[in-house]
Image (cartoon, helix red, strand yellow):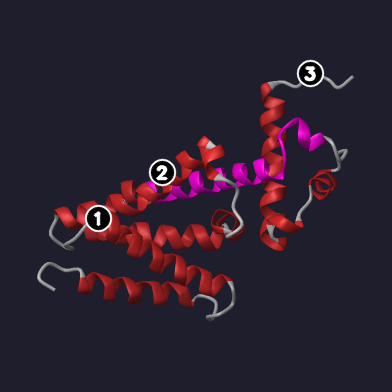
Amino acid sequence: MPRVLSESDVADFRERLCDVAERLFAEKGPEAVTMRQLAAELGVSPMTPYRYFADKEDILAAVRTNGFNRFAQALERAYAEASGAARARGAAVGEAYLDFAFEHPQAYKAMFDLNQPHEENYPDLVAAGARARSTMTEYVKALVAEGVLAGDPEEIGRMFWAAAHGAVVLELSGKIPAGSARTLHRHMNGALAKGLRPGA
């Protein structure tokens, strides 16, 4: 008879399992990873993960939820701690974005993998994704309010997000030299900002 697990036991094992899954999903792709492989990595029986998650899709959703929350937290902290006008706070958010992506590449790959579970079945993942999206518009709202940029903050935020994501993916996939994403990101941001200035 299996022992009764405390909430701490459950949380600890779920965290360990998600750490292993994050790495394997990034290395092999979610479709190539099995529950048996995850169990073997942790040295437990093949059925043990099913005591904590319904299936592999449930684990992927948990990994992505954790990634998006950590990502959002990093950007929120950068915005809150930056000093100066909106432009300086926006630059801090951009740097925090690249820092997170390159310091946590496995989490970043899992967050944006094209093979994703049905998000509507995972309210925590939906909330984490919404939190992450808001980090990409809050600093833009300040830029618009201060007259640095003109336009819809939501749309502008998506443009800056697309630019940052593109630079990150190009470097992570080896399509541009290591370390060059930051320079590319700054150049794209400068070009975008120039075109979005009032009266441009």
Q: Which residue is mark 3?
A: 4
* The one of 184 and 32 positioned closer to us in this rendering: 32
Q: Could you tell me the amino acid type at mark 3?
A: Val
Q: Residue at x 47, y 60 (%)?
A: 99
Q: Position of residue 24 (x, y in %)?
A: 72, 56
Residue 131 left/right relative to 34: left
Q: Could you tell me the amino acid type at mark 2?
A: Arg
Residue 66 shown in magenta = yes
| Mark found first going from the N terminus, 3 or 1 | 3
The N terminus - image quarter: top right
**Extent of the magenta region:** 48-76
Q: Could you tell me the amino acid type at mark 1?
A: Pro
Q: Position of residue 194 (x, y in %)?
A: 21, 74
Query: Contact, CB < 8 Å: mark 2 with mark 3?
Result: no
Question: Gap between marks 1 and 2, in whole Å?
Answer: 16 Å
What is the crowding at mark 1: few (fewer than 14 residues within 10 Å), some, or many (at least 20)?
A: many
Q: Which residue is mark 2?
A: 131
Q: Which residue is mark 1?
A: 153
The C terminus - image quarter: bottom left
Question: Gap between marks 3 and 1, in whole Å?
Answer: 50 Å
Q: Residue furthest left?
A: 199
- Provide the secondary structure element on which disc 1 rests: helix
Query: Total number of numbered labels?
Result: 3
Q: Residue at x 52, y 74 (%)?
A: 170
In this rendering, the answer to whether 1 lies above or below 126 is above
Q: Characterize the magenta stretch by its predominant secondary structure.
A: helix
